[in-house]
Amino acid sequence: MTSLAEATCSDPDRPMAGLSAFADHAVASGCHQVWRRGCCCAPAFSPFPFAGFPRGLAEYLAKQASLSAVCEAGEQGLARHRCRGWGHRQGGTKMDSFFGLRVFDIWKKGEQKSEVYASEDQRKLKTGSCINYWNLTLKLHQKLHHIHNSKLENRGKDTRTNFTDHLYKALSDKGIYTFIDREIIGGEKISPALLKAIEESRISLIVFSENYASSSWCLEELVEILRCKTSKKQIVWPIFYKVDPSHVRNQTNSFGDAFADISCRFKDSTEKMQRWRSALRQAASLKGYTCKAGESEATFINHIVEEILVVVLKRTFWNVAKYPVGIQSQVQDVEMLLDVGGNGRFMVGIWGASGIGKTTIAKAIWNEIAHKFEGSCFLPNVRENSMPQYGGLIQQQETLLQEILGGKKLKIASADKGISIIHKLLRHKKILLILDDVNQLEQLDNLAGVGWFGEGSRVIITTQDSGLLKCHGIELIYEVQKLFDYQALELFSLNVFGINEPPNDYLELAQRAIAYAQGLPLAITLLGSHLRNKGIHRWQAILDGYEGEPYLGIQKILRKSYDALENSMQQVFLDIACFFKGEDKDYVIQVLRSCKQKVSQDCIEVLIEKAIITIECNRIWMHDLLEKMGKDIVHEECPIEPGKRSRLWFHEDVYHVLTENTGTGKIKGIMVEFPKPNVITLNAPSFSGMDNLEIFINRDAILSGHIKYLPNELRFLDWGRCQLHSLPSKFCAMHLAVFNMPCGSIRKLENFKYMPKLTSLNLSGCQFLKKIPDLSGIPNVKWLNLSKCTSLVEVDDSVGLLDKLVELNLDGCFKLTRFATTLRLKSLERLCLRNCGRLESFPEIEDKLESLVILNIGESGIRGLPSSVAYLAGITYMSAGYCDNLTFTSLRRIYGLQRLTTLGDKVNSDSNISLALPKLVFFNLQGCNLSESNFVLPLDCWLTFTFLDLSGNNVFRGPGCISKFANLWFLRLNGYKGLQEIPELLRPSVDRVLLPNCTSLEKFPKLPQGVRWLDLVNCHRLGAYEITENILLNKVSVSSLSLFLYIIVEVFRL
């Protein structure tokens, strides 16, 4: 096919013939081209001016090409039109665009002279005589600088009718869009438009011929080209056409004669001549091509074109997205991490879920920065292409080397040899490498080892697995963000309607669609494309159904995440998708670790790293689309019979299986959760046939009736409000790890003699349970919850010997009279005996309980703590409020007490015993009827107090020791009716002083400047003068002024 430039410039001596040929060609083939906008590559109209042609000729061209033209009267007869550009090919997602090669053929004829002044919209030509030249390329180059990569600069007189035309023809035949600029140059100054054209080129070919050096224009252009080579990292290739490179370098022989002629003309411009000589030396020293006399020009040209084609294809752009909404800000974030142009070698990971836009971002980054490197390679779909059937890693290594080095593809014998070759050939080369969709560490080890590439190199890896990146030593990881709702709505609207916002009558349905997609660009795009040109009723049906297209297309992409998981992790994923989305992480881990199929300790972390789940507030979440995919996978196991699926969660399926007895050995887990609380009447064989049932969870149903069988394979039994009075007699709980039956009707704990795997037992709220039997058969239990068992009277002594027990809760066991007599619980961290009103004694402690942090005996009947309480060396939080019979005597022995929350309003104080709590920080002794002698504290205690609450004490004037608390921050004396004055010199650390209802308070001290909160409500005897003098005039923080005024009003009012 004849190109535009060829048609117009094939015969420089017959301009009308060439232009007529162009017009005919335009009609026949419809000239078109590829035009890049930013990072995108897409077909579009591109401007092509008929500047510099006579008025009639411009009109003729426009008419013949069937193109609209607007002709402007004037000397130049400017005409403009838009011409559809060259077509493009698309392979995969990569655009093989037709890059333009600017070809300049410049010559003189006799003594004819001209001066050219170029601007954006017109060219002004001033001539001394009639001349014959073409100046067509300059402005075209300006407009299309995104698509052409090359500039050919040469001396037209030597090559215009042979070498230049042949080179042009060869380039055109290869699909490279070629431009020719043929001018008679009479001036010395390069036009601004041409300067811009040079700057925007990526490849420059300089054809040195015998008379090249006789043109000042050529020499100035050479200087500019070399400047751009340095500043813009352009590629410059010299072509020595029948001249020796050394002659050009040293300006000798016939080439030197031409340079001597121009030296005479510019003998007074020493600086300019020096600049030209330097440029010639520099250019001639570059690697280039030499065409000797007698050599086949065809072979020589083909060789050049092949190498240009390699470079052109390497510099292609990637199609980013039709509507790149929300992409640019994330591209900028990644570019900040890359620090292109900085020193060092960086690897940056782009991490996120399937369909979130990782590859799109990588493509956009490539388009923006690839040209800044000596070599670049984008390897798409590494996960898939690394498989043996697609060539494997060796094929990937060969592609990497060919993309960066060019030339023929190297043959690599093995992956290990490939590693060595890549390192050897690229260790000094500044490259950009993008590995897309990596899912195995082996891929990184074989394609992008640490330190393989030269200084300034950058490697970008897109993956769903952040753990993989960390294993490879990559610290710079960018997590791709989901689209905000407004971005999602814009992207959806563009895909459906081609506008930024949907029409009002579609807005509600559009919001439903983006709510379903939850910010996932893939889902938004597929949904939008599928709903295009469909009516509202059709929209409604599609959004209600969640079946067929476009949902199958979305699931197909997301399924890759699931397929890449190991089998055990697939089972964990399905459990979470079907049962545990939104559940507490620790609860889920309990369930998973109890199952027959062993999972890794870090199974949750693995799914987080693979961008499948997230953790928020310690709860597990996953995208609704992933949840649906997991449930679909289980449903596909047997679409017709739910009893033959591995997991049941849908309430209708659960009801059917339990009431119709259709369960089979395929079922591994059941969750009972109805939209509204419901009653299911079980029968004796409800669970028969489910021999492999491991998980049974009842969320909200009342399961009545009687069963005779529970599967022995049960690992996790969470059955709230269970109506069973006891477990089936033949149930063997050998494998049971979690037994939760809160608020149930169970009366006796049988079958608990040997449950070696049980770690959690929750019988809270079981009001008919009277006795906890011997639990020595469950030695590994960690959590024992018997709270609110209001009929519970006795707990076996074996409870005190469970050395794995972490938490024991007996809160609200009102009738409990007998508890373990001895505690040997070395793992115990939390013990609660609150509201055990009939429990009078606290067990002896046989060994140090350093792990015990929290002890709550508030409102219990405990009379005292044994002397062995001194073994509670690690306790930091204690509540003993409203213990009617408890004295301080034993508390003084708790050396490690850090935070005593409450001793309560009814604690009996012993005035003969002084408190000795040397590590006390939080001290709350409301209504304890204290005396001065109670505050004989050791010296180190004065340094630890930060919180002191002595509210409700009324038998003495006030604790004079308050001023000794060096770090006191909070002081509260509410209702301290006997308090007459506050001691002087409160410490500067005091922030809050709360003295409401101190009706006897008469004298108030000067406050430290740090006090920000003061409460003196109902302090009747405290006069306004004392408040004003001692508070407001004492430079107390003005920020509390409104509070002070409020207090004053209250004082005066009362």
Image: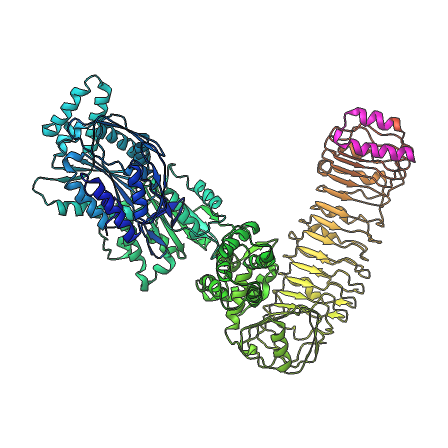
Q: Quick check: 359 left or right of 612?
A: left
Using the rendered view, name the quadrant where residue 437 is placed.
bottom left
Residue 823 showing in the rendered view: no
Q: Nearer the viewer, residue 346 or 121?
A: 121
Residue 293 drawn above or below residue 695: above
Residue 863 drawn above or below residue 677: above
Q: How is the image coloured?
A: rainbow
**Residue reaching furthest to the top:** 268
Residue 436 drawn above or below residue 706: above
The stretch drawn in magenta includes residue 1032: yes
Q: Nearer the viewer, residue 645 or 224?
A: 224
Residue range (magenta): 1026-1054
Using the rendered view, name the quadrant where residue 398 is placed.
bottom left
Chief SS of the magenta region: helix
Count of all numbered marks drawn on residues in the image: 0
Q: Nearer the viewer, residue 81 or 1008?
A: 81
Residue 170 showing in the rendered view: yes
Q: Nearer the viewer, residue 54 or 402?
A: 54
Q: Position of residue 94 (x, y in %)?
A: 35, 53
Q: Position of residue 788 (x, y in %)?
A: 76, 64
Using the rendered view, name the quadrant where residue 824 is placed.
bottom right
Q: Quick check: 274 left or right of 659?
A: left
Q: Position of residue 843 (x, y in %)?
A: 74, 59
Q: Position of residue 537 (x, y in %)?
A: 57, 65
The stretch drawn in magenta includes residue 915: no
Say which quadrant the C terminus sits in.
Answer: top right
